[in-house]
């Protein structure tokens, strides 16, 4: 059982079979089959069928205070308390939106609608295009793109904003001198937030 | 050669995706090795031609979220399963969204082969087959069968002639199988009726496989067209994890194959056992089942893959812009056109969607263009299917030049990694270092140990307890089983 059967392909071409490295071989236990001939293998006297039955009953019961199920071999009693809710977290949290992100999302709705740079009186504000992460350097080991006092031209890269896992190199857009940098490397930024100020 | 009647053709065989794409589409790729273990014997005896156990997202989610060592799972599954196993990579991008050098591509494939994987399935999201040549060469060198995929898309440039030309390239690369991969479920029976026979003709006897998702609700009919056209295999999932964004159900496609006189011999009771098992896991762990979707014409507009839609909604909600989803979906259609019709699969789906979000939120098209999109426009990732718009090229400030094979841009990485991590580090670990920063590459646990400890046979009593303690609002549970009394309260 050290090699697999590879089906011959349609044109009769037979695939290579390969003996796996011996260190990888672990013999299959003879009695490894589950529930093939006997669905719902019994352990003691409760079967998966009964488990599903019990759960079906619990679900069908809807709102209840106590639930009990008894057979000679197995019994279960469940009470529903209305004093407090258990804080057992389900493993079904699939990493999508969770509770903790909700308040932030509400704030963000206010912050983001359409963003326009507010160039004023000889100053240009470099704004965050989106909610994201701010980086001052092209990669963690490089020096920052710019420092306060750096001279920039319109196409000088000044920072990177990571949005939805993609990196956006942000250019100065105007020639001038950086006179303020408001955000630290790696900080989370909101849409429209002022990142830097350029003196034109 | 006279055309064979359907019943003269070999049976249409099934390839299982329950351990891979099914949970990628329905459970955000979170199936653990322990959840798989009790199903393996029955999957193995069900009569599948192949069993797909790995794809890009599976590897990545194992490392990033499950923190399971993927190499341990690969070896474990290939050892437990006698049916040949199939692992999918994204060619030069392997499991992630960036390009890797040929030496890393080769190491990854060597490790897959050594772990017992028999078939290397490989695709390039741009259908630039130069991005899969190094994988094909490595797979052959390490004794694997090569299954190369054409990625299906709908656009004015993706006509039958386009796909036939790509398939011809794969024939010249001497692959063992050619697959049609339809990540968004966009194929229709009408399109299959012209495309599939054309591919069968150009494939010149190389067996064809179909891998199509169910978002449009049409996939089971599309599989019938493939069966009629003479395809050899179809990727399918166990019933409860089929449909929705997942692939068609094995029993449904089996029934189609039967009606068309091409049914393979399968063990129906084993299939039922597999399905009963995963149905229980859905109940126990509160995980979703696949639901049949009604035909949705909107899908043909935005073309966003199933896995991506749920992700996108979550991302938009996190960004606080869930209410602009419709606008963003409409903008993706425009962005895709402007970018020369890339196929909406990873990573290009992410590029397009992110660009659409930026366009909508900034109220101006292409004011900010992600660096990856600029690289794409230069041809860094491969040839574009169509032509990018003049506006986007100008705003990106780049020139399109696809003359070089993308892998040639990347210099070999292994010798530096070896220097950095030392001689004693395993090749498996070295490969993880090639893919991930140390905080992710180090400290992965062996999920197979958890699987073995749990066992492959469900213990009904503990299964019931697992269900009861998982976040259900029970204040007190008291149970007696044989001579065991157990009670707990919260």
Image: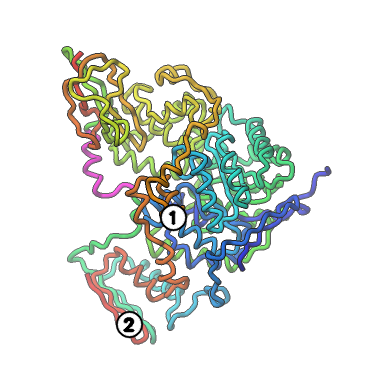
Residue A73 pos. (x, y %): 39, 85
Coloring basis for residues: rainbow
Q: Residue visible at 20% across and 66% down? A: A82
Q: Residue visible at 29% across and 36% down? A: A140
Q: Determine the image quadrant of residue B97.
A: top left
The residue stretch that appears in magenta: A96-110
* Residue B272 shows in the view: no
Asked whether residue A99 is drawn in magenta, I would say yes
Element class at badge 1: loop
Residue B138 pos. (x, y %): 58, 45
Name the residue tied to disc 2: B480
Majority secondary structure of the magenta segment?
A: helix
Which of B276 and A5 lies nearest the eye of the viewer?
Answer: A5
As drawn, A168 above or below A10: above
Residue neighbourhood size for the residue with mark 2, other residues' Cα within 10 Å, grouped as few (<14), some (14–19), many (≥20):
some
Q: Is residue A72 left or right of residue A89?
A: right
Q: Chain of mark 1?
A: B
Q: Residue furthest right?
A: B2
Q: Is residue B392 left or right of residue B386?
A: left
**Sequence-earlier tag: 1 or 2:** 1
Q: Chain of mark 2?
A: B
Of labels 1 and 2, the one closer to you: 1
Which of A17 and B391 lies nearest the eye of the viewer?
Answer: A17
Asked whether residue A182 is drawn in magenta, I would say no
Which of B456 and B290 lies nearest the eye of the viewer?
Answer: B456
Residue A12 pos. (x, y %): 75, 53
Q: Residue visible at 71% across and 47% down? A: B230
Marks 1 and 2: same chain? Answer: yes
Name the residue tied to disc 1: B426
Q: Is residue B227 left or right of residue B331?
A: right
Residue B356 pos. (x, y %): 39, 29
């Amino acid at each position: 059982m050290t090699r697999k059967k590879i089906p011959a392909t349609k044109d009769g071409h037979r695939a290579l079979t390969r003996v796996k490295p011996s260190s990888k071989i672990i013999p299959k236990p003879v009695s490894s089959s589950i529930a093939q001939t006997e669905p719902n293998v019994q352990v003691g006297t409760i079967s998966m069928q009964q488990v599903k039955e019990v759960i079906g009953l619990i679900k069908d019961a809807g709102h209840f205070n106590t639930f009990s199920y008894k057979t000679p071999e197995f019994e279960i009693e469940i009470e529903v308390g209305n004093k407090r809710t258990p804080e057992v977290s389900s493993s079904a949290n699939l990493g999508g939106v969770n509770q903790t992100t909700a308040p932030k999302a509400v704030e963000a709705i206010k912050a983001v609608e359409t963003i326009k740079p507010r160039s004023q009186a000889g100053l240009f504000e470099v704004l965050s295009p989106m909610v994201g992460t701010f980086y001052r350097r092209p990669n963690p080991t490089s020096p920052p793109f710019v420092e306060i006092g750096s001279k920039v031209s319109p196409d000088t890269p000044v920072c990177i904003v990571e949005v939805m896992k993609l990196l956006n190199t942000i250019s100065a857009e105007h020639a001038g001198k950086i006179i303020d940098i408001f955000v630290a490397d790696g900080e989370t930024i909101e849409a429209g937030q002022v990142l830097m100020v350029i003196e034109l | 050669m006279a055309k064979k009647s359907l019943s003269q053709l070999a049976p249409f065989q099934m390839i299982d995706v329950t351990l891979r794409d099914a949970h990628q589409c329905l459970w955000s790729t979170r199936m653990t090795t322990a959840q798989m273990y009790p199903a393996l014997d029955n999957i193995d005896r069900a009569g599948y031609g192949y069993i797909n156990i790995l794809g890009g997202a599976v590897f990545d989610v194992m490392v990033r979220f499950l923190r399971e060592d993927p190499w341990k799972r690969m070896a474990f599954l290939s050892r437990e399963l006698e049916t040949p196993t199939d692992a999918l990579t994204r060619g030069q991008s392997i499991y992630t969204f960036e390009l890797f050098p040929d030496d890393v591509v080769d190491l990854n494939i060597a490790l897959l082969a050594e772990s017992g994987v028999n078939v290397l399935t490989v695709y390039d999201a741009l259908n630039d087959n130069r991005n899969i040549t190094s994988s094909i060469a490595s797979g052959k060198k390490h004794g694997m069968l090569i299954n190369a995929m054409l990625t299906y898309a709908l656009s004015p440039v993706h006509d039958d002639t386009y796909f036939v030309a790509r398939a011809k390239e794969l024939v010249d690369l001497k692959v063992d199988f050619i697959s049609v991969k339809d990540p968004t479920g966009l194929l229709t029976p009408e399109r299959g009726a012209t495309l599939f026979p054309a591919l069968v003709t150009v494939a010149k006897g190389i067996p064809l496989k179909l891998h199509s998702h169910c978002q449009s609700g049409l996939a089971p009919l599309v599989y019938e067209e493939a069966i009629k056209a003479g395809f050899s295999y179809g990727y399918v999932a166990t019933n409860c994890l089929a449909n929705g964004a997942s692939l068609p159900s094995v029993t449904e496609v089996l029934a189609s194959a039967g009606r068309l006189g091409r049914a393979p011999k399968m063990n129906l009771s084993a299939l039922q056992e597999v399905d009963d098992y995963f149905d229980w896991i859905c109940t126990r762990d509160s995980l979703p089942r696949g639901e049949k979707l009604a035909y949705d014409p909107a899908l043909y507009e935005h073309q966003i893959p199933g896995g991506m839609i749920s992700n996108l909604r979550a991302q938009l909600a996190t960004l606080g812009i869930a209410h602009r989803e419709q606008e963003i979906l409409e903008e993706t259609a425009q962005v895709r056109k402007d970018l020369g019709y890339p196929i909406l699969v990873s990573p290009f789906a992410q590029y397009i969607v992110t660009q659409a979000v930026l366009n909508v939120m900034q109220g101006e098209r292409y004011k900010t263009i992600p660096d990856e999109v600029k690289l794409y426009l230069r041809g860094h990732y491969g040839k574009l299917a169509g032509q990018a718009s003049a506006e986007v090229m100008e705003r990106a400030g780049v020139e399109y030049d696809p003359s070089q094979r993308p892998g040639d841009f990347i210099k070999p990485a292994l010798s530096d990694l070896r220097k950095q991590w030392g001689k004693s580090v395993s090749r498996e670990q070295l490969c993880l270092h090639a893919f991930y920063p140390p905080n992710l590459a180090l400290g992965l646990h062996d999920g197979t140990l958890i699987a073995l400890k749990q066992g492959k046979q469900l213990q009904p009593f503990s299964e019931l307890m697992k269900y009861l303690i998982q976040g259900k609002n029970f204040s007190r549970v008291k149970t007696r089983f044989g001579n065991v009394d157990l009670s707990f309260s919260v």
